[in-house]
Image (spheres, helix red, strand yellow):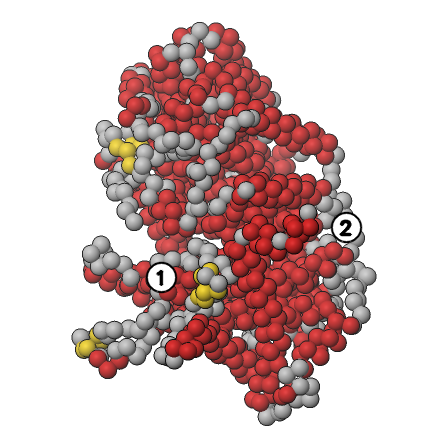
Amino acid sequence: MNLPPIDWHAIAPELVLTAAACLVLVVDLFLPDEAKWIAMPLSAAGLFGTLAAVVSLLGAERVTLAGSFEVNDFALLFKALFCVIGLIILALSLDYFRDGRYHQGEFYFLLLCALLGGVVMASARDLISIFIAIETISIPGIVMAALRKGDVRSNEGSLKFFLFSVLSSALMLYGMSLIYGVTGSTNVDEINQVLPQQHEGLVAVSVFFVVIGFAFKVSAVPFHFWAPDTYEGSPPPVAAFLASASKIGGFVGLLVLMFRAFPAVAEQWRPAFAVLAALTMTVGNLIALRQQHIIRLLAYSGVAQSGYMLVGFALIGANADTNSQAFKATVIYIVIYGLMDLGAFAAAISFARRGGTYFISDYSGLWNRSPALAGLMAAFLLSLAGVPPLAGAWAKLFVFLASIEAQVYWLAVVMGVNAVIAAWYYLAVVKRMFFDVPEVSEPIETPYLLRAAMGLAVLALVASFVYPRLVTDLADRSVLESRGADVELSSP
Amino acid sequence: MEAAWQEGLFFVFATVITVSAIGVVTARNVIHAALFLVATLIGAACIYILMFAEFVAWAQVLVYVGAIVVLMLFGLMLTRAPIGKYGEYDNDQKGLAAIVAAAVFGVTAWVLIDSFEGVELPTDRVAATTSKDVGEAIFSSYVLPFELVSVLLLAALVGAVVIARRDERVTSRTIDAARREKAREEDV
Amino acid sequence: MIDWIKQLPGNVIDFIGPEIIIATAKVVLVFGVLLVTTLLVIWFERRVIADMQARVGPNRWGPFGLFQTLADGIKLFFKEDFRPAAADRWTFVIAPVMAMVPAFLAFAVVPLGDHVVIAGHRVDLVMSDLNIGILYFLAVGSLGVYGVVLAGWASGSKYPLIGSIRSTAQMISYEIALGLSLVPIALVAGSLSTVDIVAAQAGTYDNIVLFGRDLNFLEGIIPHWFIVQQWPAFLIFLVAGIAETNRAPFDLPEAETELVAGYHTEYSGIRFAMFFLGEYVHVVAISAMAATLFFGGWHGWNPAFPAAIDWLRWIVPIFWFTIKTVAFVYLFVWLRATLPRLRYDRLMWVGWKRLIPGALVWIVVTAVLNSDPEEVPTSARLWVMAVVFAILLAWVWRGDPRLTALEPWRKKEVTRGTA
């Protein structure tokens, strides 16, 4: 048996992360209860190691494992993003899991496994790898969501997530098996070459199933029902994970599939994405208007944000120029969304940990109690709303411009209207923090670690507003182009 | 000649699968539903054998029939084995579910028939897949997803134990729970 | 028309083809032989146990009481077919069949001998040489649980239900160890097919070097059976196999003192006989598999035959195979006569904390020992071995739950946990 050589350097980030996860699991066994928190710095070290491996690959263009695994700037950007998100979530988790005495070691292990799924997803160029990667993100997520075992809402949220996840996986797999059936390949490039010659209806149905599967994962309307309940019920750091890493994992998968595997048949699925995007934005924002609970608010606003990210997919196919415009806008939006949403979660968690609750009414007069926390929270919310001088503004603007460029004006109008609706509820929270009178006047001390993490996030957001090339350069470099003609087609 | 045999057997197994799949969702008793599921899975394994995919067929029997459904039955027995009279498991969404199922069936059936009608698929492509072929595929181009699956299963295993285990510590005394109490009071 | 009918037998053969006829004949023959074997095995067990207990055993009906089981069978056949009122009708009927059929199916991949030539057709003495023979054996074996689960539930009464839960837990736990114990065999033989595995055990060990010494006098004596190299796998296989068949000392499902008769309490007559049949066929199947996978299958001393009866040569492999299988059946009986029943928690402990980790460790060791020396350097082997050894130490150190009370540091741990 002749095994093809494996490019070990190309999969170094995955190897480091796997080793770190196993190490955390084993070390946790031998730690006494009081010292279980050591698993967190250990996991952080693992993530820094992974980040180092990613940095060592910068600028590389490597393809290994029979074309199913690709390392390029796109992959590295998202690998790094997953590592950063992981580090921020670790910072959020330490206090929470140490004081709560939840299963700390297991939590960190599961978190690393889920991030591993994301890191693999960034490089996966093969239906099987993509499917396994998305499952590796969601299954540990399901378990982590159930970690507050004493609380019924955690159980309920986790169960809902589980059922939706299983259903979406089944649909996705069915679609993928149909695609394999008609194309005879699992490789995205080969699929893209063979797909246009196949029967239109069959292709449309199979792509439709795959898209529905991913729509569940990124909580697009009308497949979003699980998200608010699950976010609310799960431990807040896990909610932050689900809203950021898990969702971004889904989007990375969608990017690979839609821009690499199915662009040749874009005519057939583009309208579906337009509808999906418009619905997701509008419904998410309208429901968010009425939320009283900050996590639920962030959940619905997250749904709406998914809508903006889906816009890019509705613009594929007109010509190569608009394609790359849409792709870049989506990538930028995803990266910035990851930072600002995570930041908002971090602020909410640190407020709740130091005397507050998750109810928005409690945010009255936060400015008087902790100017730093109120400022940070406001920054994240304003960025989510798309208010300058924060990077969120660029994110929205790029997507907006891309849809104008592609001459899909109605979608641009929907986006504009939605931005206004969204601003309403984000600003309502900000107004409450700055202008309302607090019920309690106790000052709040934010945990040191969290403040550092949030400060860095805000800095990044402001910096990339002032100097947008920080992100646009990244996006420009991260091209997801088919390797085209040099791919040998296996006869179907 | 052989193709005719194959086709005939295919229809036999397909009928078994369809009937028992309908049985799974309509059975009044969970245990009966599980048994119908067994019949469905074995029928699928038989179809794999018709396609010369012995490895997949027996792996299906070993994993799904021999392990997963057995564990389902075991779980049922441990928790709420319905001895004697059976309860009602249906709910009022039955009609809606039937409509959705029929629609999905209709669309996929139409699409598949429409795209493959009259197409003669080459039969010489079908050769027996040995365990060696499967092994080589898994350990060459699909080695990464294969290894990732092992991480996934490990995570699922650890997670299942974490969720199923009874906590020794009293969780209601934790800070989180105390805060929850406070939140409830404010809610009222 | 009439001509056509006259030629019917020939036509039928032409129509069906010799392969299908040979296959059918094999199936019928093996099924019949197994039925008779079961009768004999039951008689054998009763006689052997009686002998060990200084009794005579069945001795009235037939020479040495050989027909005793037949008489019992006839009795069971004519007994009333009783079904409890609370029983679930169809499941109650299906359960004994589900217990019996998989045990028979396992024989499809057991090579009983080499091959014979009948009327120019080469007939291999194995029902089917699947390229995934071991997987098939495990898959079919895993179906046996259904008989137990369904019987316990369908009876609609508590003792069978408890008994069936117990034995299901036991069977699914030990199935894992059973499967893992066969992985090293597949690694060594390089195939999952039972025929290939038997072929890989042909011949003897030549050129035996131990600690730098050439042991010439052993040359050509030690057969190249997998038991020599794979004895740890064999031990695991044996223990798991006995547990799979639900026999002493693992016969908890039928612990009379606690559960009346376990999952088949409510069964009587011919349905009860089916459970009985299933159990004994299973014993024979595990014995045959042990002989096939670890003891060279049908390989054995092959004497020179006079030319006149050389065509009878095909009997020799069958003879060796039978001898080996009977030896294992004897071992099963012997264990039943000797060993007391395990406690339930101990049973689970052995399965999950000894057999499964042990099998996993052994898989790694086998893989390392059999790797290509050019691909895997000696230092890497040593490292793997060191890690395995460390795991083994840790594993043994974790110890026996019965001993925890004697270890002060563990006691502390326990009190802290509950405080």
Element type at marker 1? Answer: helix
Most foreground residue, A237 or A174? A174
Q: Amino acid at mark 2?
A: Tyr
**Quarter of the figure that contains the N terminus of chain B:** top right
Rendered view: A480 above or below C140: above
Most foreground residue, B91 or C416? B91
Q: Which residue is mark 1?
A: C189
Q: Horizontally, is A240 left or right of C65 in the view?
A: left
Q: Horizontally, is C195 left or right of A51 in the view?
A: right
Give percent across and percent down for residue C23: 54, 58
Name the residue: 45% across, 36% down: A131
Give percent across and percent down for residue C185: 38, 63
Residue A191: name its quadrant.
top left
Name the residue: 59% across, 81% down: C45
Q: Horizontally, is C5 left or right of C378 in the view?
A: right
Element type at marker 2? Answer: loop
Rendered view: C166 above or below B73: below
Farthest front residue? C3
Name the residue: 69% across, 54% down: B80
Residue C172: name its quadrant.
bottom right
Q: Label 1 crowding class (10 Å Cα cut-off): few <14, some 14-19, many 20+?
A: some
Farthest bottom residue? C54
Q: Amino acid at mark 1?
A: Ala
Q: Which mark is residue B86?
A: 2
Distance between the Cα atoms at labels 1 and 2?
Answer: 51 Å
Farthest left residue? C212
